[in-house]
Image (spheres, helix red, strand yellow):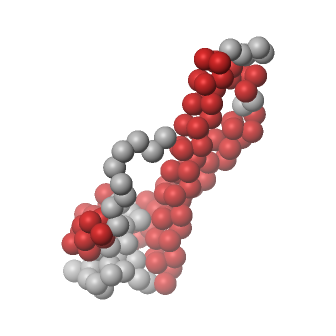
Amino acid sequence: MALTPEQTQELQATVERRRAALRAEIERDLGKVRADRLEDLAGASPDPGDESIASLIADLDQAETSRDLSELRSLDSAHGRIEDGSYGTCVDCGSDIGFARLQANPAAERCIRCQTQYEKTHASPTGPTL
């Protein structure tokens, strides 16, 4: 069943709120990354342990920013689909994406069946990523 105009409006508002929140968070994080220097994180004369902790903090900050940017890109894509009228339609099979799924993940571009298949065929290797 296709989305009703009210459902589309509700989801559009959710997408816009999340996009705004992510933009603000990314700006804050990038400002923090620019302001944080090794000396600030590890101290004026760091030992190797302090340096490794400072490096870990910087890596975690970068990973968080990358995750936020990825989510923002997905939401930007959802915004584009709302604008062109294709929001709520699976990009693979053309079926309707359920309202409950879009409430849980407003950036969803596939129905559950196609997303399951996509994850099986595009699975990334398991294991540590840092």
| Nearer the observer, 105 or 121 | 121
Whether residue 41 is visible, yes or no, is: yes
Whether residue 6 is visible, yes or no, is: no
| Nearer the observer, 74 or 37 | 37
The vertical placement of 54 against 93, above or below, is above
Describe residue 86's horizontal placement relative to residue 80 as left or right: left
How far from the left and from the top, in percent, is residue 31?
A: 71, 40
What residue is rendered at 63% in x and 41% in y?
29
How far from the left and from the top, in percent, is residue 83?
A: 50, 79
| Nearer the observer, 40 or 49 | 49
Describe residue 42's horizontal placement relative to residue 89 as left or right: right
The vertical placement of 66 against 7, above or below, is above
Describe residue 54's horizontal placement relative to residue 88 as left or right: right
Q: How many marks?
A: 0
What residue is rendered at 75% in x and 29% in y?
37
How far from the left and from the top, in percent, is residue 28?
A: 65, 42
Q: Where does the N terminus fall, quadrant-wise?
A: bottom left
What residue is rendered at 59% in x and 23% in y?
53
Q: Quadrant of residue 115?
A: bottom left
